[in-house]
Structure formats: structure tokens, C-alpha cells
Image (spheres, rainbow, N blue to C red):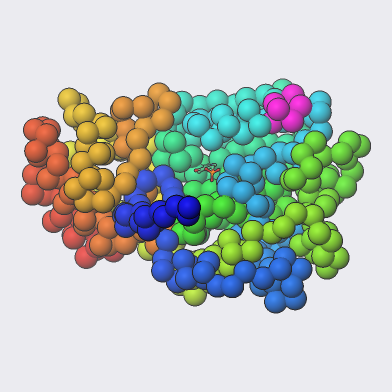
Amino acid sequence: MSERFAKLDPPQRVLMGPGPSDVSVRVLQAMAAPTVGHLDPAYLAIMDETRQMMRDVFRTKNELTLAVSGTGSAGMEACVANLIEPGDEMIVCVNGVFGGRMRDVAQRYGATVHSVEADWGTTIDPAQVANALQEHPDTKLLGIVHAETSTGAHQPLEEISRLVHDAGALLLVDAVTSLGGMDVRVDDWQIDAIYSGTQKCLSCPPGLSPVSFSPAAVAAMDARKTQVTSWYLDMSMLRNYWGSDRVYHHTAPINMTYALREALAIVLEEGLDQRIERHQRNHLALRAGLEAMGLVWVPEHTLTTLNAVRVPEGVDDARVRSRLLGEYGIEIGAGLGPFKGKAWRIGLMGHASSKRNVMLLLAALESILADENANLARGEAAVAASRAYANA
Ligand SMILES: *Cc1c(COP(=O)(O)O)cnc(C)c1O
């Protein structure tokens, strides 16, 4: 007897959390294109094209640029696994969940890790990095998060990059929540290794992690005395598949590559600068609206792609989020770690960074908070946001 199943029917949401973000129909349709073989010349051409598009979006000429099979965390692990040998010294900057995750990964690959820490919601001070580099002159790699999605903090990188290179070390950057939404300049900022994810500002479903390595990072990999501990993430083999040799390593996620190709095409057609400005404009309008309601921002130096605000006193965090989802189909994120129950994380990433979503969220949140008897200003948010758009 054969079983019958109901039609798969996930709801249409408005994804304004810390990721995934809304995916455009064009990207979803690309995923439905015919699956071909991972060595089919037609697929190899799509890979090459996608690779070049990744370089353009990273603003780099790095030869070793590819998409790791897996989400952003796989990209993080790929960077660390290939650049760290057991006993190597690594400095990891930690001011939120993802810096903490990078430290955990580095320890698992045998790095001797030195942490540079800052309070959640703040950024790492270059002076702290200078001190750490002075204290640990044998540091091979310094890892830092550009866009700390757990706190909404935006980390400036240029000065830190200069310090790291003056000390003869390599710079590893997490750009999961900035690539495709905020300025990321791999070559100008001399970033040696960088990873991102498909489901944040690139507005593609989760499943691939674009990564890029500078010539200096490739030289460090070539100089390894030990094999990379992870077989799956070993760049010395992956680059033979992505490069001209086309040696089978693992079966590429074919249809995910289609999706990434299409998502990157959308980014490049809009224009990186225009896209960054759009994220800025929508962030400023959302911020004007939320602040007019009386909500308070968490980080001083904020991302435009992820907006972290404090949950107002006396308001039930989980109930508000669940009402947003149930009544409006809007997903926003909860606080993590020390911000659990204390912050909301509102994503304006990629396709979801739109005037429509900003105005919808402001209206929905204002109405729910009024219902919940929160002590906040009413009727001001939309006006303030409209004014911000008019002045943009
Ligand atoms: C989301 C995120 C990651 C992890 O990506 P996954 O796709 O969830 O594996 C890493 N770093 C930052 C800053 C992120 O926002």
C-alpha cells in the first residue's frame, strides 16, 4: 500500500530576522532548473561565472575564491582549518556569539588562541589589537567579525588590518551579515581570508558559503607541514575542482549554485554601491520610526543590515515576536546570550531591505505594543520614517 502525503505548504513569511532573509522568486526559480552533472561542461561554465561574480561582490581579484558547500559556519571552519596548524597562534576578537564561535572552531583545530574581548554591543578597539599583537608576536592569524549579528555592532576593519599586517600576521574576516548589504572591500582592506553566507544579505536560501583567500593566505596554506584535519574542507583539494583541473572532490550542490549565481546576478545588476545605499536608507528610516516610538538602540556603531533594539521595560519579548509572526507573518529575531529576552534583532537584509517592510514592521510593532500596554509613543513612527525617506 502506498502512502499519500499532504502537499508541502510552508507559509509565505516576511523574513526580518537575523537570517535567512526573503528570497526573490527569480532565485527560487533558478533552483528549479534541471539538475546536471557536477562535471557537465554546462555546469562548469556556471561555476566559473559564479566564481567571477563572487570576486566582484567581494571586490577582490583573489584567484582562490569559491563557494564552500555548507552554510556560513562551514566557511568559517574552512578558513580556520586551512590556515591553522596545531600549535599555531591565533588571536580571535570576541564581542558576541560569532566571535565566540570562531574561537571555539580555532581551538578545535589546535590553535593556541588568544582572545581580545569587548562588551557585547561594542566594537573592538584597534589599541586592544595592537596590544595583543605585541604580547603575542608569533601570531599567525587574527580573526574578527565585521558584522556581529548577535549584537548589531559594525566593526571597522581598516586600521586593524594595518596593525595585523605590520605584525606579519594574516587577517581573517567574518562577513556573513555584511556581504551584499554593507561595504566589504577585500583587496582595499587587505583581508587575507573571508567567508560569508548565502542567506543573509545575498538573499538566497542557506546552503553555500562564499570564501576568498589572498595570495598570502594561499602561500600560508602551501607552506603547511601538516595535512588539513578536515577532509571535506581541504582547500588543496577543493581548488583542484574549482580550478582548471576539475578533479572530483565531492558532488557540488548543483541547484544551490544556480541559486547563488542568480542571487549574485541580482546584486551586481543593482550595483554594489546602490545596494549599500538602499540598506542605509531603509535602516535610517526604520531607526527613525523605532526611535520615535521610544525604542533604544543596542550598539553605538550599528550595522544597517541588522538592527538590535532593547525590548522595552515590562514587555513580554516572546509574546511580541510570536504575535508579529502569527498576525502579520513577520519574523524578527530574539536576543542571544546576555541579550536573551532583552533585545530584538530586526534584519533588513538583501531583498527584505525595502520601504514596504520598514513601514509594515513599524505599523505592526506599534499596534502590538499598544495592545500590550507598553509605555511608548503612538502615531509617530510612520511619520518619522516617512520623513527619513523624504530626506534621504
Ligand atoms: C549567520 C552567521 C554565521 C553562521 O552562518 P550559518 O549560515 O548560520 O552557518 C556566522 N557569522 C555571522 C556573523 C552570522 O551572522
The part of the chain drawn in magenta is 106-112
State whether residue 41 is above or below residue 256: below
State whether residue 119 is above or below residue 170: above
Q: Is residue 321 left or right of 148 when viewed as pictured?
A: left
Residue 160 visible? The answer is no
Image location of residue 351, percent across then percent down: 39, 62
Q: Going 47% across and 54% down the picture, which residue do you hit?
A: 2
Camera-side residue: 91 or 372? 372
State whether residue 259 is above or below residue 338: below
Image location of residue 64, percent across then percent down: 75, 58
Q: Tell me where residue 12 sits by quadrant.
A: bottom left
Image location of residue 256, percent across then percent down: 58, 61
Image location of residue 158, percent across then percent down: 59, 47
User: Residue placed farthest to the front in the image?
Assistant: 1
Camera-side residue: 313 or 317? 317
Q: Is residue 356 left or right of 87 when viewed as pictured?
A: left
Residue 109: say if magenta.
yes
Q: Is residue 134 left or right of 317 when viewed as pictured?
A: right
Q: Is residue 322 left or right of 7 when viewed as pictured?
A: left
Q: How many callouts does the rendering have? A: 0
Give the quarter of the figure containing the C terminus. bottom left
Camera-side residue: 9 or 299? 9
Q: Going 31% across and 27% down the picture, which residue do you hit?
A: 341
Residue 290: say if magenta.
no
Q: Going 69% across and 59% down the picture, which residue do you hit?
A: 252
Q: Going 14% across and 38% down the picture, which residue do you hit?
A: 369
